Structure formats: C-alpha cells, structure tokens
C-alpha cells in the first residue's frame, strides 16, 4: 500500500531520499513564485472531487474493499484498505461535496457494521483533486512546464494522479534536459493524452449510472474472466471515446 507523508517508508520520504542522494537542495516552507521558470508541480487548483477518510491501526487481515453507492460517495466510491495492520478508510466524492462529513460518517457506519473496525486513535485526512485536459501545460511564455495536478493531469474516472504526476514530471525534465521545452506538450499528449480523454468520457458516463448502473457495472466486472484486463480495456483510448470527448467538449 502506497503511503504518503512524513513517516518513514512513505512515497514522499522515498522521493526525498533520492533527491538528497543527488545533492539537490530542498527548501521547505518557501513558496515557488508564479513566474518561476522550470517545472511547476504545485498540485491541485480548484476541486473536481473531494477525498476524506481515516488512517488507523487494525487487526483485520489484508483486504481491499471498494463500494459504489451514491448514499456513501455520490458519483464516486468508498473504500477500506487493510494491509499489514494499517487501514485506510475513505470516501471519494464527485458531487454534493459540501456535505462530505455526512458521507464520511455513513461510510464509517457502513464498514463498522460489516467489519467491526475500531477507529480509536484514527487520524483524519482529506484533500481535493483537479482534472482538466489543458490545451497547453506551459506557462509564462513557455518557460514554465506544469506537471501533475497543477496541469490537471489525473485519471478523471476515479481520481488517481500519482502515476500521471511522476510521468509528466519525468517528461517535463526530459524536455528541459534536451533543451527543448517546446516539445513538452507534444510529449505528454503522445504519452497519456488519449488515456485522459478516455477517462473524461468514462467519468461522464459513470456519473450518470446511479446505484442501479453501479450494480450492472460491478456485475460486468465480476463476470469478467480477468478483471484487470476488463478494466484495462475500459480505460484504453479508442476512436469512439475520442469522438465522445469532442462532443462533450463542444457541449461544455
Ligand atoms: C486523499 C487523497 C487520496 C489519493 N489517493 C490516490 C491513490 O490512491 N492513487 C493515486 O494515483 N492518486 C491518489 N490521489 C491523487 C494523488 O495524490 C495526486 O494526483 C498526486 O499526488 C498529484 O501529485 P502532484 O505532485 O501534482 O501534487 P501534490 O502531491 O499535491 O504535491 C504538490 C506539492 O506542492 C506544494 N505546493 C503548493 N503550492 C506551492 C508553491 N507555491 N510553492 C511550493 N510548493 C507548493 C504542496 O504543498 C505539495 O506538497 C489521492 C489524492 C488525495 C487528496
């Protein structure tokens, strides 16, 4: 399970170790000026979705449970992940975000009733997500390359952006190292522009399913011989998804 934050073994601490091993200077508590050139990866602006939840210790065996229900997480999903004595419970909400507290309480009750989880000592966490497919991920006359959610790069269907952040950061760095910042837009479009278009179309349809539609979605997924392969096809770019994307963009 990928962990974030200051504790040892987290993704952030791993990245920090790699950075320091290359004698790169880290400056904490200092804001990057808007006009700074180079790579800007300052995270989400605006909120497309909200994630709220708890991390806590548990004696439950390792498991990953996802729930699709507009009662727990409108147009999104709730989940409980347990791994090695640690648990993460959250709801990822794509509508009615102002009432996130009520949805989180219901998600807690839902899992408590089924698993008996104990939230004593639990730490609350939360954050927002931003998704948009920009015409360009360059700013300030092209000298600033936006990476990760600062550019809007993220999977629109479920709100997963870690891989997008790293891949786009890598592509931005490559463009700078090859003294060709102008190629950045071409690079990210070629690498994941199609995936993002597909994810925006998937989100459009998913948001219209409702609880009955979620049932059908899960039945299809459950009946698939290989669920990962089924999801891979669901995520894959295609001509019809590109056409839908164009239609949706026009209607926007
Ligand atoms: C609760 C939650 C759960 C998630 N779970 C998953 C998941 O399971 N899988 C997945 O793939 N994605 C997940 N995501 C999404 C994923 O975390 C993000 O898409 C990803 O972290 C984006 O990376 P980033 O580097 O663009 O931005 P961030 O990780 O947000 O990092 C941006 C950093 O820039 C700093 N910053 C902001 N402004 C400035 C400034 N002016 N100067 C200097 N620094 C600044 C911020 O403090 C922050 O440290 C989750 C998001 C949330 C909120």
Image (cartoon, grey):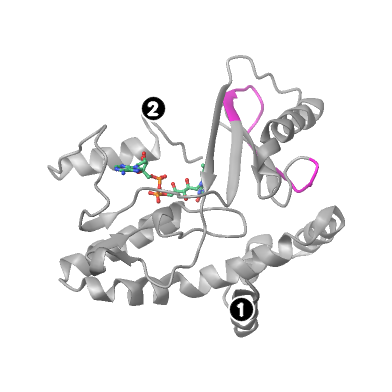
Figure quarter occupied by ligand 1: top left
Whether 96 is drawn above or below 196: the answer is above
Residue 65 can be seen, yes or no: no
Q: Are marks 2 and 1 in contact (CB under 8 Å)?
A: no
- Along the horizontal axis of the image, is 186 left or right of 48? left
**Residue 200: x and y, percent?**
60, 67
Secondary structure of the residue carrying numbered label 1: helix
Name which quarter of the figure residue 166 lies in. Answer: bottom left
Categorize mark 1 by other alpha carbons within 10 Å: few (<14), some (14-19), many (20+).
few
Instruction: Return the disc, 2 or 1, that comes first in the chain's sequence.
Output: 2
- Along the horizontal axis of the image, is 176 left or right of 69? left
Categorize mark 2 by other alpha carbons within 10 Å: few (<14), some (14-19), many (20+).
few
Quarter of the figure that contains the C terminus? bottom right
Mark-to-mark CA distance, 2 and 1:
45 Å
**Residue 211: x and y, percent?**
84, 53
- Nearest the camera: 64 or 24? 24
At a point 25% along the width and 69% down the height, the residue shown is 142
**Residue 230: x and y, percent?**
68, 67
At a point 64% along the width and 70% down the height, the residue shown is 201
Q: Which residue is mark 2?
A: 7
Name which quarter of the figure residue 170 lies in. Answer: bottom left
Q: Residue furthest top?
A: 120
Q: Which residues are magenta?
A: 54-71
**Residue 18: x and y, percent?**
24, 43
The label number, if any, that marks residue 250 in the structure image:
1
- Nearest the camera: 80 or 177? 177
């Amino acid at each position: 399970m990928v962990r974030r934050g200051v504790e040892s073994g987290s993704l952030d601490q791993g990245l920090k170790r790699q950075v320091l091993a290359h004698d790169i200077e880290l400056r904490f508590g200092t804001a990057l000026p808007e006009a700074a050139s180079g790579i800007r990866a300052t995270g989400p602006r605006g909120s497309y979705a909200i994630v709220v939840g708890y991390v806590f210790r548990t004696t439950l065996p390792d498991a990953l449970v996802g729930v699709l229900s507009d009662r727990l997480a409108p147009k999104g999903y709730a989940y409980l992940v347990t791994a090695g004595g640690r648990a993460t419970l959250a709801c990822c909400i794509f509508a009615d975000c102002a009432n996130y507290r009520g949805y989180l309480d219901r998600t807690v009750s839902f899992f408590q009733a089924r698993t008996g989880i104990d939230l004593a000592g639990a730490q609350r966490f939360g954050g927002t997500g931003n998704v948009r497919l920009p015409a360009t991920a360059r700013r300030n006359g092209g000298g600033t390359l936006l990476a990760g959610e600062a550019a809007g790069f993220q999977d629109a269907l479920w709100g997963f952006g870690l891989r997008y952040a790293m891949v786009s950061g890598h592509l931005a760095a490559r463009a700078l190292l090859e003294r060709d910042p102008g190629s950045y837009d071409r690079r990210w479009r070629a690498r994941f522009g199609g995936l993002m278009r597909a994810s925006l179309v998937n989100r459009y349809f998913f948001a219209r399913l409702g609880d009955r539609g979620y049932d059908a979605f899960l039945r299809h997924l459950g009946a698939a011989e290989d669920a990962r392969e089924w999801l891979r096809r669901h995520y894959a770019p295609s001509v019809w998804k590109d056409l839908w994307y164009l239609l949706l963009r026009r209607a926007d």
